[in-house]
Amino acid sequence: MTTNHLIINGDQTVSHIDRQIYGHFSEHLGRCIYEGIWVGEDSPIENTKGIRNDVVKALKEIKIPGLRWPGGCFADEYHWKDGIGPNENRKRMINTHWGGVVENNHFGTHEFMLLCELLECEPIICGNVGSGTVQEMSEWVEYMTFEGVSPMAELRAENGRENPWKLKYFGVGNENWGCGGNMRPEYYADLYRRFQTYVRNYGDNKIFKIACGPNVDDYRWTEVLMREAHQYMDGLSLHYYTLPSESWAEKGSATAFPENEWIKTLKKAQRMDELITRHSAIMDQYDPNKRVSLIVDEWGTWYDVEPGTNPGFLYQQNTIRDALVAALSFNIFHDHSDRVRMANIAQMINVLQAVILTEGEKILLTPTYHVFNMYKVHQDAELLQFNLESETFEEHGLSMKAVSATASRDAAGKINISLAHVNPAKSTKVTIDLRGLKQDKLNITATELTADVMDAHNTFDAPDQVVPTAYSNYTVNGTELTLTLSPMSVTALTIE
Ligand code: AHR
């Protein structure tokens, strides 16, 4: 037996892995919406009513289940009526929060809903509590979902959309402890109770209401929100970003990073486990049946911006290190899938830990994109009971488990196992004992994502530096597998 040993009980399920754990976030920030998604109908870039076709195609491939919009900090300054009606009448303004650029409001509610229709994903709208009114929020929901005679339904029809959209997820404010109004939890809890009252269910449209949750380890925020308002919410959000350093002023580079920032970053990504555990424990006190979901609606790496780019645009490259952050995060979300029922990586395109980068008409898929693709098999699957013993990876006075894993069974009975190996210097062996299987002969297909150097990444000139390849570095003995995992790798196996 190797020092890394994984026992999977294929006949014992633990919880359902909600597909919304694989969700995304798109904000009016930098080149996420404009350029990344929206190029306008007159663009030479192929588009559907202004939305880039290449981006839609790539996102459909990874089956994105949900998309959060319009922010972020932008949400609490966004007035939705600025973004409807003929383009020439839409307000032009400065995006004061992000980069000081002109926001022409050409991408608004109709465009966002069309994007979600093209992607076949759930829209997740974040309303404005920080600088908006109850009436404004209430009317937005009416505009989007009311069928029948009403001022907002009529306005919607005047703007070309007769039928209401379906809207499931609605966030009542964003980071109201910070950019969303610098509120105390007691004050926000009361505001949340008030605002959510008017986020109404019209017809058969039933809204899942998400309250603004804590920043990182602000356990008092969770305590107060759950105590004062748990009965009025379906979800409570959590935001946690992975920075290599302790300083927001000098976070560290996405690519040109010193060796010690490898383990520092991955260990900090692993902290998500502790945060979810501790926040969930508080939620359990008020909601032992786990009716209220923990929604990690902003997560991912946050580095210094690429040299020469607008500091307010948060544009960063994405390496094999980010791929491992993504795999570790998914494994953690799965472990907590009895409480965590949605997560949204920040952000989808051209901002922070993006899955896609664009430059004019060019597009590239990042290592993080490939992890989303490899892990999509877990969407709406059943988490299997497993036990993992892993060797320790030690470097620069820090240590963490070298191997992290997850396993699930899908509706067709296939078993999917995903492993992340964080040691960049050596390969390692893992034995997997598969127990309680229906299959008597294992039919295995496998892929891996790895690289030769810690900062390996894809560029517009070399877009295939880090891509998944077929994996066959394993032996099978009955229902025991022995895998040799490459250094710094993500490996995915499907067993039929
Ligand atoms: O994702 C960038 C910003 O990070 C979001 O606007 C905000 O919610 C968070 O602080």
Image (spheres, grey):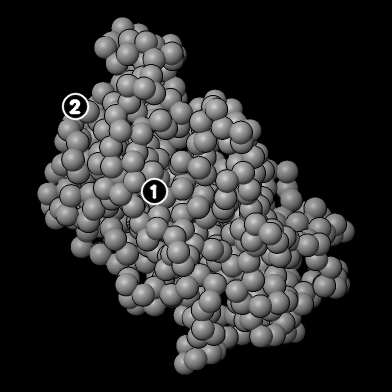
Quarter of the render that holds ligand 1: bottom left
Q: Residues within 10 Å of mark 2 (few under 14, many from 20)?
A: few
Residue 82 image-quadrant placement: top left
Q: Which amino acid, by three-letter code, is at mark 1?
A: Leu
Q: In terms of secondary structure, where does tag 2 sit? A: helix
- The reply to whether the residue tagged 1 has its Cβ within 8 angstroms of ligand 1 is yes
Q: Position of residue 77 (x, y in %)?
A: 25, 41
Left or right position of 4 against 183: right
Secondary structure state at the residue bearing disc 1: loop
Type of residue at label 2?
Gln
Farthest residue toward the top? Answer: 149
Above or below: residue 324 compared with residue 15: below
Residue extending farthest bottom:
397
The residue wearing badge 1 is 29
Q: Position of residue 330 (x, y in %)?
A: 54, 60
Q: Which quadrant is home to the N terminus?
A: bottom right
Question: Which residue does the numbered mark 2 point to in the structure image?
Answer: 135
Q: Is residue 263 visible?
A: no
From the viewer's perspective, is 292 left or right of 422?
A: left
Residue 128 lies, with reference to residue 263, above or below; the image says above
Side (left or right) of 119 relative to 230: right
Q: Nearer the viewer, residue 351 or 379?
A: 351
User: Which residue occupies 36% across, 75% down?
Assistant: 250
The percent position of residue 135, horizontal first and vertical second, equals 19, 26
Residue 305 seen in this snapshot? yes
Between 400 and 35, the one lying in front of the other is 35
Mark 1 surroundings: few (<14), some (14-19) or many (≥20) residues within 10 A = many
* Residue at figure coordinates x 36%, y 34% from the top left: 104
- Residue at x 47% of width, y 73% of height: 253
